[in-house]
Amino acid sequence: MSTDGQDGHENELAESYSPVAPFDDTDTPAEVDAVWRSQRRIALSYFVVFAIGTFGVGLAIVGLSWSGDNTVFGGFSPAFVLAGGALYVFFLILAVAAATLANSIEDRMMGAGPAPFGSHRE
Amino acid sequence: MRGQRHSGAIVNEPRFGILIAALVVAFAISVVARVRSTRTAVDFQLAGQRMGVITNAFAICGDYVSAASFLGVAAAVYAAGVDGAWYATGFAAGFIPVLLFVATPLRRFGDRSIPDFLARRFNSEKVRIVSVVMVQLVILAYLVPQAVGGGLAWELFSDLALPGLTPYSTGIVASTLLTSSLVVIGGMRGTTWNQAIQFLVLLGILMWVAVALYADGFDYSDSVAAASAEPLRSVVESSTGEVSTESTVNQIGGGAARFSAPGARYSRSGQFALLATLMFGTAGLPHVMNRFFTSSTGRAARKTTVWVIGLIGLFYALAVMVGTAARFVIARDVAEHEWLADISVEGVLRTPEHALLALGRLYGGEMGLSIVTTGALLAIMSTIGGLLLAASASWGHDVYEQHLNPRASRTQALRAGQLVVAVIALAAALIAMAVDSNRIPASVPSVVASLVTTAFALAGCALTPSIVLAIWWKKVTPTAIIVGMVFGSTSAIACISYSLWVSASDLLQAPTIFLAPMVFVVIAVVSAFTEPAPDVDQIWVRMHGSANDRKAERLARITLETTRR
């Protein structure tokens, strides 16, 4: 379903109440292209960290016998600590960092922020 | 055989009160949602695209956490130690690729369903039709094990059966009928609220068990040490039907497996194959991805995913702890409880899925057992609800509204979606009933979890590569996407079928680790020789731009300020 009609109505409504007019309600292809490239770089970088972290832990668990034979933090084996809890914390930290960075890039490069070098707004 | 395994049913006195109370609440929520709905197809399938971040995050968790997670993860840890915990890690890891590559652009560009997203991205009705087929394959692969789980959970809950049906078939009929009624009445809005509350209930049950364990003097690290002090044992059944326990063989280094070391269930390659299948399958699950269309903005979808990663991590960490506790507590307490001796052999549970149920009964008596069993049924219903809505969106919108009746009125479109829910629920129930529960071998540790892994493999090979490339690569072509989806699905089905019926193999059972990269390559090669979709720059502006988000956020602020004045 297209939401163009709805968007148009929302746009008019928003501008009629706007304390600061006019709003920057459009993204130019140049702006979006720059943001997309930045977001793609971030996504790939974080994915590499995620893959190395997760599969690296997997490799350590299945490849190194000490991960199952030794104990840390009382009776836990390193393998159990990693698979049973530490990786969830790693995922959450990674997610918060990636989302924060992605949001800040959008804020800086699109909308109210200054236009990126080499692009122009219509 | 299943019947023999079930002979030690641990629900002696069914407490229907808790189940009926849970169902009354669920139907009340659906009725309220119906009253507040605008009664359009968009409202029915996507809750008007106005779901809050936290509500939607809880609902996604409710959608995602099926019986395979609620009972299956604790069971897997109980039976296989670290290898079972690894299973939970794969489920939780799946949302990281969703956050990085899919959630925000999918919401910004998509409107109704995965097929709708792909069709509009490539301006191709052929892409729409092929992706509808893929989505239905994944939904069916996920729906049938949930219905089977409903039958198995009912067998545990009660011996009651509808006339002419076994308790197993009664469970299937009841879970699919009740859930499809809830979905038809409440649509996406009611289902979202129900799923959010159902996840809270499941999380609450795990927390209650954890608190009860600690109040009883449980020490997590001591339990791991105690469980690891001797070889891991499992129940085996001889050809004459006698049951005993024997040491589990380590699949990695040989010898006896231990609780805190890998190898109790999977080989080296099997560990990574499973992890990759669960990690990459999530981004292709239609019922989970459809939930992102209900977010108000792309940025809200991103924030929702972060919440999901936190909540789902908490859930699985608790499930792993409970599975560990069961290994220690059941062996310790078996001499004091006759019912526990009935369902175990030499202190080891005959059926690992009973681990959470047994702890519920140990710490909450019959009431505790009934609460956990009701939780398992709710988990199944919650996932079935999400799957039915995803089927409704793809058939109702992508087939009926786009092809069969393009001039459909709002009421006709709504009715078509509701009819699809009923038909798909009926089909899943019939297929699940054809699975004879007595023929499910006791050696299968978690039937539902194993079948669900197949759905993850299909989604990860057929849909995830297409969705990711459609979002991030401008030069991908509609022809390449069609070829990629067909290649991914047929090769995944071939691998899994070969593994099931010809020669068992860890890698072929979970083939995403080598098939998904092949699908990426196939799509890239075909794209090099075919024409890309037109107007890619305009599509990119909508998919990766944030103008609509800014407008929606500003409108929300203005509405809030106007209300305050």
Image (spheres, rainbow, N blue to C red):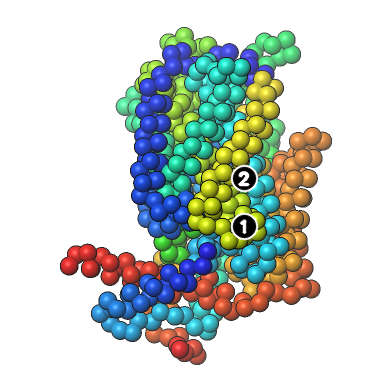
| Residue sitting at x 70%, y 74% | B532
Residue B423 drawn at (x, y percent): 61, 40
Taking the spot 46% from the left edge, 21% from the top edge, the residue there is B358
C-alpha span from label 1 to label 2: 24 Å
Q: Position of residue B247 (x, y in %)?
A: 64, 23
Tell which of B111 and B468 is nearer to you.
B111
Nearer to the camera, B300 or B130: B130
In this view, the mark in front (1 or 2) = 1
Q: Amino acid at mark 2?
A: Ile
* Dot 1 crowding, Cα within 10 Å, few <14, some 14–19, many 20+: few
The relative height of residue B59 versus residue B150 in the rendered view (above or below) is below
Query: Dot 2 surroundings within 10 Å: few (below 14), some, or many (20 or more)?
Result: many
Residue B405, label in figure: 1
Q: Quadrant of residue B448?
A: top right
Specify which label sits upstream in the sequence, 1 or 2.
Answer: 2
Q: Which residue is mark 2?
A: B139
Query: Residue B323 appears at what percent x and percent y?
Result: 49, 31
The quarter of the image holding the C terminus of chain B is: bottom left
Image side of residue B35 versus residue A76, left or right = left
